[in-house]
Image (cartoon, rainbow, N blue to C red):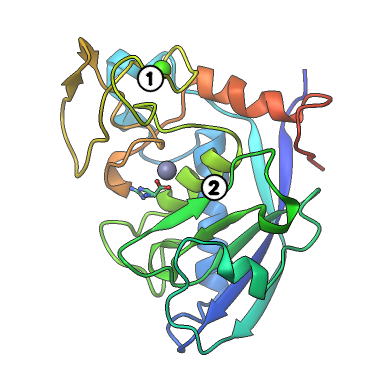
Amino acid sequence: NLGVVNIPVYVHVVYSNSNENISDAQINSQIAVLNADFRRTNSDASNTPSAFASVAADSEITFTLAGTFRNASTTTAWGTNNAVKSAYPPVTPSTHMNIWVANIGGGILGYAQFPGGSSATDGIVVSPQYFGTTGYVAAPFNGGRTTTHEVGHYLNLRHIWGDGRCNRDDFVSDTPSSDRPNYGCPTTAYHCRSNDQFMNYMDYTDDSCMNMFSEGQKERMRALFASGGGRAAI
Ligand code: ARG
Ligand code: ZN
Ligand code: CA
């Protein structure tokens, strides 16, 4: 038994205007959301429907802010091709999760690298308007759940619809199969002969409508921290 695993985090703020140079308070609000969501102390945990409450997990993963780097840039939109990581390289990615808060553009909220990729591009990127819960944030993605979702990818989670048809898997048995993402704030979503777990952080619903990881997702994430699993924790 690993017990609670802690991941130290470096935040690289890359800004082209003063709004994008987000405050320490905004950064801290995001770290607080990560800790709540991954320990299932989120205040909206009670919104998980009864059908899924028994598989909703305390993932026993915590996050501590290890340092913040601020970089002024003339680039106004970085895209999703890792350019921001080449410009501002990750710091000790073998032991720290690196997060770049930089405007991606094109309406993209965030993107992540799965475990096992190049260390030069390891980490996640989130646009500043979707990072944290206070300051320069934009509804309906002002609940910090974009970063929760991207950290899920960083810890090996797939989208719950498996990025395909009903027979494509996310490799997690307690997330029912689906064939599509859900958006907005549904009350029910029936696809592939079962009800979707649309309130899972790895779906595409609005921040205020997602509130759980599952036990199967917890197991998949934490397998990374077993010996030889591919990610270090301090
Ligand atoms: N589109 C992004 C991704 O697939 C993030 C989606 C986050 N959703 C949210 N409700 N905050 O990685
Ligand atoms: Zn995703
Ligand atoms: Ca599944």
User: In this figure, which residue is indicated by the disc labeled 1?
Assistant: 168
**From the viewer's perspective, is 30 left or right of 202?**
right
Q: Secondary structure at mark 1?
A: loop
- How many numbered badges does the structure rendering display? 2
Q: Position of residue 55 (x, y in %)?
A: 44, 16
**From the viewer's perspective, is 217 left or right of 233?**
left
Give 206 or 178, whichever is nearer the viewer: 178
Q: Are marks 2 and 1 in contact (CB under 8 Å)?
A: no
Residue 34 - label? 2
Q: Nearer the viewer, mark 2 or mark 1?
A: 1
Q: Secondary structure at mark 2?
A: helix
What residue is rendered at 50% in x and 18% in y?
171
Q: Position of residue 11 (x, y in %)?
A: 64, 65
**From the viewer's perspective, is 94 left or right of 207?**
right
- Is ligand 3 closer than 8 angstroms to the Cβ of mark 1? no
**Mark before the other along the chain sequence, 2 or 1:** 2
Which amino acid, mark 2? Leu
Q: Is residue 144 above or below residue 175?
A: below
What residue is rendered at 45% in x and 12% in y?
173
